[in-house]
Image: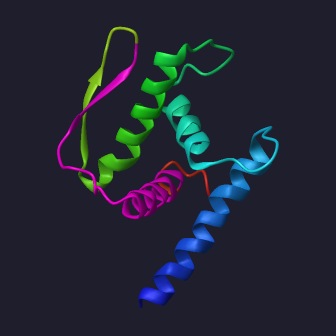
Amino acid sequence: MEKKFMQQFHINWNKVMSYIQSNFSIEGKIDIIGIIYLIGIQELGKGNNQFFNKEDKINILHIAICRILEPFGYYSFLGKDKEGWPHYILKNKIPFNQGEQLFLIKKAIIRYMNDENILE
């Protein structure tokens, strides 16, 4: 079962990468941070030709991480502030091991893309 799960995981991850490559003007290969940033922009809903400073960009990454890890029980949505920025609270510690974190984030991205009906 583990082998089948991992095969499906890789198929789904490749679908995510194909979607990103074919729907965004990105030269070369996008990295995981780039995908997380795109999700953050999507969740913020203010991405069209808006300038974001360095602090905003960090907050956008944070929004995405919180949003994609929320279904796994790591974060809980609190609401949006008066500027429309979403806020979350940490409920459970995220695995410390970098390999576990990367796998969890990729799994969360796949789930997000499926939940949002982005992947067919």
Q: From the viewer's side, name the closer residue of 42 and 101.
A: 101
Give the residue furthest to the front: 97
Q: Quadrant of residue 46?
A: top right
110 displayed left or right of 51: left
- Residue 62 left/right relative to 40: left
Q: 32 and 8: which one is in front?
A: 32
Q: Is residue 54 something that shows in the picture?
A: yes
Residue 116 picture location, percent across and down: 51, 48
Whole-percent x, y for residue 83 in the image: 40, 9
At 18% from the left and 49% from the top, the residue drawn is 92
Among the 4 quarters of the image, the one containing residue 25 = top right
**Coloring basis for residues:** rainbow
Q: Is residue 81 above or below residue 64?
A: above
Q: Is residue 75 above or below residue 84?
A: below
Q: Is residue 104 above or below residue 50?
A: below
Q: Is residue 53 on the magenta stretch?
A: no
Quadrant location, the N terminus: bottom left
Q: Residue at x 47, y 51 (%)?
A: 112
The span picked out in magenta is 84-113
- The residue drawn where x is 29% and y is 55% is 96
Query: Would residue 45 appear left or right of 15 to someone viewing this image?
Result: left
- Identify whether 21 is placed above or below 18: above
Q: Quadrant of the C terminus?
A: bottom right
Q: Residue furthest top?
A: 82
Q: Is residue 44 visible?
A: no
Residue 94: horizontal and vertical position, in percent? 27, 52
Queried whether the magenta region covers residue 98, the answer comes back as: yes
- The residue drawn where x is 33% and y is 60% is 97
